[in-house]
Image (cartoon, grey):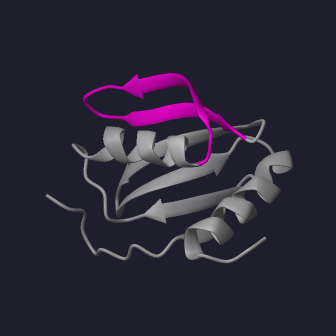
Amino acid sequence: MKGHNVETAPRIRTMASGNLSLLITEDVSWESFPDQAQSFIDRFGGKVIERIDTPVERMWTVTIKGCKFWLSFEDLPWGMSLDSKSSRCNSVVRELYSALVGRDT
């Protein structure tokens, strides 16, 4: 089963902290998240630090290009997002966004 309101184009959002969040895709489900998350991490040479996979939450702590992020499944609306843990990671979010939409940084 795929997510609701499928809009697979990535987009950048600003969180309440002022740090950036990358909505990777809305074409994800609870069941497909682990495989899709691992594929994303592998594509960008990242590493999983911690996996929180409970009946009510899927959130992984990952590093990509030396920055720490939360990679999580969102259920309202459905999506997979990469959230910066610090403002220093915002440039990496922009770089990943450019790679996902096929633009050079």
Give the overall secondary structure of the magenta segment: strand
Residue 11 rendering spot, x and y as whole percentages: 57, 72
- Residue 55 seen: yes
Q: Quadrant of the N terminus?
A: bottom left
Given the current orientation, which residue lies at the most extreme top position? 50
**Image-based side of 95 in relation to 8, left or right:** right
In magenta, the rendered stretch is 44-64
Q: Residue at x 36, y 35 (%)?
A: 57
Front one among 66 and 84? 66
Q: Residue at x 67, y 77 (%)?
A: 103
Q: Residue at x 31, y 64 (%)?
A: 27
- How many circles with numbers are drawn on the protein? 0
Q: Residue at x 37, y 65 (%)?
A: 26
From this view, report whether residue 52 is shown above or below residue 67. above
From this view, report whether residue 37 is shown above or below residue 62. below
Q: Is residue 54 magenta-colored?
A: yes
Q: Is residue 84 magenta-colored?
A: no
Q: Quadrant of the C terminus?
A: bottom right
Residue 45 rendering spot, x and y as whole percentages: 62, 40
Front one among 91 and 78? 91
- Residue 13 seen: no
> Would you identify the image quadrant in which residue 61 lies?
top right
Given the current orientation, which residue lies at the most extreme left position? 1
> Would you identify the image quadrant in which residue 76 lies?
bottom left
Residue 56 rendering spot, x and y as whole percentages: 29, 34
> Would you identify the image quadrant in which residue 69 lies?
top right
